[in-house]
Image: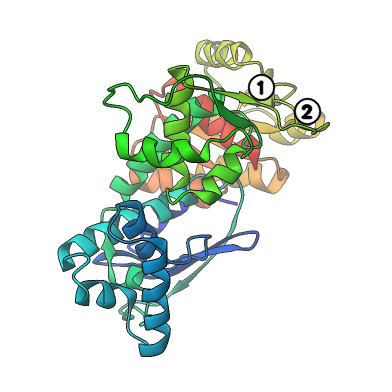
């Protein structure tokens, strides 16, 4: 399966218009792509009433008031946003800003899914469906690349957070007074809302479910509190199976293919330093023999000498094995990058590439 970032990149480069449906188990999201931007037609997540949760989170209404609003919505058939505006709880502009924030979080969440299935149905010029959801009324930035850049930034931050919070089943517990030190990285209102839920019983996963904040926000705050010594993590009491997970590189074998000996050696050192077992070969050699003789978890393919960005080489590799592979290329032309993606590459990294970015993308591929 293509990564969601590469998929959106391919659709954007082709100026595709239609509906992208993405599934992960029981979760399902539907995004409409068009000239004006992206619309989140269906969330399919655990947030049943995102606008109501935003209102509670910002202290505009109580949970009881939300239930009253939802009951009125069921009686009248009016949209929750219209009822909120009618009661004067939020101005129209504030409602739109809140929904923009919620849509962004929903779409960014897709980039964190380790595995998923998707379907794209072309439907140029189709009006957004009127399903009564305030989310489907809002258009996100038409520049898909800007969304991908922010998603990549978050992926890098989540990779750092994962080193401190390696398992969502771990239980956070407070280690000292609840006084919140002044810190630009900590939003005081968010911390004050989360601290009562850190009771030494809820796991990180349960805390995310019980809070009114997006997963990324909760993890970011927990990581900051962990770094400041305000909380610690322990295994769940009475669990004989929970353990801290090791680094994703442990025991993983990578086949590194490149015709540039110095670059191949440097890449090999980088991968071995991260804990991978590395097998080396020439990308212009006998791929069938290399792949058949070397069962590996992933393949890193350098296509520096390929004028087309390695599309033909990628297609050949895809026909030989189902092992996921990443491509490194010095060809910055969009058709070349798109060609490699369409030929089966999970990720395409344009050189020069940072070590942390390479290891992060490789880790994501190995997770699913």
Mark count: 2
Identified at 16% across, 66% down, the residue is: 91
Please determine whether, in this image, residue 220 is positioned above or below residue 120.
above
- The percent position of residue 154, horizontal first and vertical second, equals 40, 37
- Residue 319 in the image, given as x and y percentages of width and height: 68, 48
Answer with left or right where residue 327 lies relative to residue 298.
left
Classify mark 1: helix, strand or loop. Answer: strand
Distance in Å between CA atoms under marks 2 and 1: 10 Å
Looking at the image, residue 66 lies above or below residue 348: below
* Display colour scheme: rainbow
User: Residue 301, how many percent across, how many down?
Assistant: 57, 31
> Looking at the image, is mark 2 or mark 1 nearer the viewer?
2
Q: Nearer the viewer, residue 68 or 227?
A: 68
The part of the image, by quadrant, that contains residue 36 is bottom left
Q: Which mark is residue 27?
A: none
Quarter of the image for the C terminus: give it. Answer: top right
Which residue occupies the foreground of this view, 174 or 33?
A: 174
Q: Residues within 10 Å of mark 1 (few under 14, many from 20)?
A: some
Circle 2 residue = 294
Whether label 2 touches label 1, CB < 8 Å = yes
Residue drawn at point x = 43 percent, y = 48 percent: 214
**Is 292 left or right of 342, judged from the image as shown?**
right
Percent of width and height locating residue 260: 52, 17
Q: Is residue 170 above or below residue 266?
A: below
Is residue 57 something that shows in the picture?
Answer: yes
Q: Residues within 10 Å of mark 2 (few under 14, many from 20)?
A: few
Q: Secondary structure at mark 2?
A: loop
Instruction: Check disc 1 and report the residue beneath it.
Output: 281
Is 361 left or right of 150, judged from the image as shown? right
Instruction: Please identify the quarter of the rendering in which residue 307 is found.
Output: top left
Q: Is there any visible trace of residue 258 in the rendered image?
A: no
Instruction: Specify which label sits upstream in the sequence, 2 or 1.
Output: 1
């Amino acid at each position: 399966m293509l990564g969601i970032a590469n998929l959106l990149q391919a659709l954007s480069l082709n100026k595709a218009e239609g509906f992208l449906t993405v599934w992960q188990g029981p979760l399902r999201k539907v995004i409409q792509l068009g000239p004006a931007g992206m619309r989140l037609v269906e969330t399919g997540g655990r947030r049943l009433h995102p606008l109501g949760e935003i209102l509670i989170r910002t202290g505009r209404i109580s949970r009881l008031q939300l239930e009253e609003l939802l009951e009125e919505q069921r009686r009248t058939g009016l949209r929750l946003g219209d009822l909120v505006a009618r009661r004067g709880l939020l101005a129209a502009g504030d409602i739109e800003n809140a929904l923009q924030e919620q849509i962004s979080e929903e779409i960014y969440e897709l980039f964190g899914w380790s595995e998923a299935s998707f379907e794209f149905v072309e439907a140029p010029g189709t009006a957004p469906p009127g399903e009564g959801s305030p989310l489907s009324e809002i258009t996100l930035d038409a520049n898909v690349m800007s969304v991908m850049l922010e998603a990549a930034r978050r992926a890098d931050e989540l990779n750092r957070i994962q080193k401190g919070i390696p398992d969502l089943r771990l239980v956070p517990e407070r280690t000292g007074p609840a006084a919140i030190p002044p810190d630009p990285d900590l939003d005081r209102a968010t911390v004050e809302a989360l601290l009562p839920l850190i009771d030494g019983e809820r796991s990180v996963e349960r805390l995310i479910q019980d809070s009114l904040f997006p997963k990324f926000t909760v993890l970011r705050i927990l990581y900051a509190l962990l770094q400041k010594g305000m909380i610690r993590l322990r295994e769940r009491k009475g669990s004989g199976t929970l353990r801290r997970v090791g680094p994703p590189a442990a025991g993983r074998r990578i086949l590194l293919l490149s015709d540039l000996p110095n670059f191949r050696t440097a890449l090999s050192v980088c991968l071995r330093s991260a804990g991978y077992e590395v097998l080396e070969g020439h990308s212009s050699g006998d791929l069938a023999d290399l792949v058949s003789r070397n069962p590996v978890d992933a393949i890193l393919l350098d296509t520096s000498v390929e004028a087309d960005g390695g599309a033909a080489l990628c297609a050949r590799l895809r026909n030989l094995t189902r092992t996921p592979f990443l491509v490194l290329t010095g060809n910055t032309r969009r058709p070349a990058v798109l060609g490699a993606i369409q030929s089966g590459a999970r990720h395409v990294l344009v050189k020069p590439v940072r070590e942390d970015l390479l290891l992060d993308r490789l880790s994501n591929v190995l997770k699913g």
